[in-house]
Image (cartoon, rainbow, N blue to C red):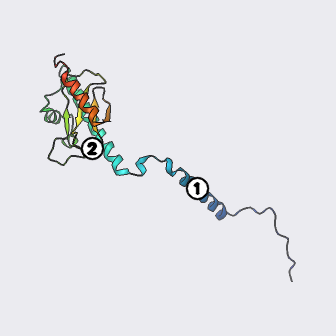
Amino acid sequence: MQAEQPPRTNQTPTAIQRFAVFVMIALGVAVAALPFLPPITRHPHQHYQFHRRTTQMRSICQGLLIYAENHRDQFPDQNEWQDVLVSAGLIETDIANSPLSNGEDTSYFLAPNRGNSMNSTELMLYENPKHDPKGVLVAFMDGRVEMVDHEVFERMLADQLAQDPQP
């Protein structure tokens, strides 16, 4: 009969045991971090759609600014700006349509302005106010795009309309 060996006191964990501990720690960290993850992970479609809308507006704004640079700081006519920018190759046709559009309404409106002023409070472009109950997506002359409350937007637009149309 074989003699019993005393238990080893300095056993090292096997690779499988080390991997299991690693996985348990990683899962614990992931679960603990879950409440701190940004909303994009909880509502990816809404975030993607908002990002797409703001990106489209920035692209249109860039097209408008390039157009104005080549036309003595004047933007195209409010009723023709989309066709003018598309025919000049400054934007693609699909960019002029908001992801929230039903296809029958106008997606974006060129705000009444006195040309390229680069005034950070002056509206350049805005999305159809009917598209989003949370607010209106607005592009300012400095290229910034923000969501503003409907009431705030109405005041901003009224203030801009009340300004003298001549530079």
Outermost residue toward the bottom in this view: 1
* Residue at x-position 31% and y-position 46%: 49
Q: Give the Cα separation between the discs numbered 1 and 2.
A: 39 Å
Q: Which residue is mark 1?
A: 28
Q: Earlier in the sequence, mark 1 or mark 2?
A: 1
Instruction: Give the side of residue 151 with respect to residue 166, left or right.
Output: right
Vertical placement of residue 55 versus 114, above or below:
below
Query: In the rendered image, which quarter is residue 61 located in?
Result: top left
- Who is closer to the viewer here, 4 or 74? 74
Q: Looking at the picture, how far across and down is residue 128, in whole percent? A: 21, 39
Q: Amino acid at mark 2?
A: Pro
Query: In the rendered image, which quarter is residue 83 located in?
Result: top left
* Residue at x-position 17% and y-position 33%: 85
Q: Looking at the picture, how far across and down is residue 55, in whole percent? A: 30, 39
* Residue at x-position 20% and y-position 37%: 108
Vertical placement of residue 142 versus 130, above or below:
above
Instruction: Give the side of residue 93 with respect to residue 140, left or right.
Output: left
> Circle 1 sits in a helix, a strand or a loop, which is it?
helix
- Say which mark, if any, is on residue 115: none
Outermost residue toward the front in this view: 151
Instruction: Give the side of residue 81 with respect to residue 142, left or right.
Output: left
Q: Amino acid at mark 1?
A: Gly
Given this view, does label 1 or label 2 mark the residue nearer the observer?
A: 2
Image label count: 2
Vertical placement of residue 97 versus 167, above or below:
below
Q: Looking at the picture, how far across and down is residue 72, in whole percent? A: 18, 19
Q: Which residue is mark 2?
A: 133
In which quadrant is the C terminus drawn? top left
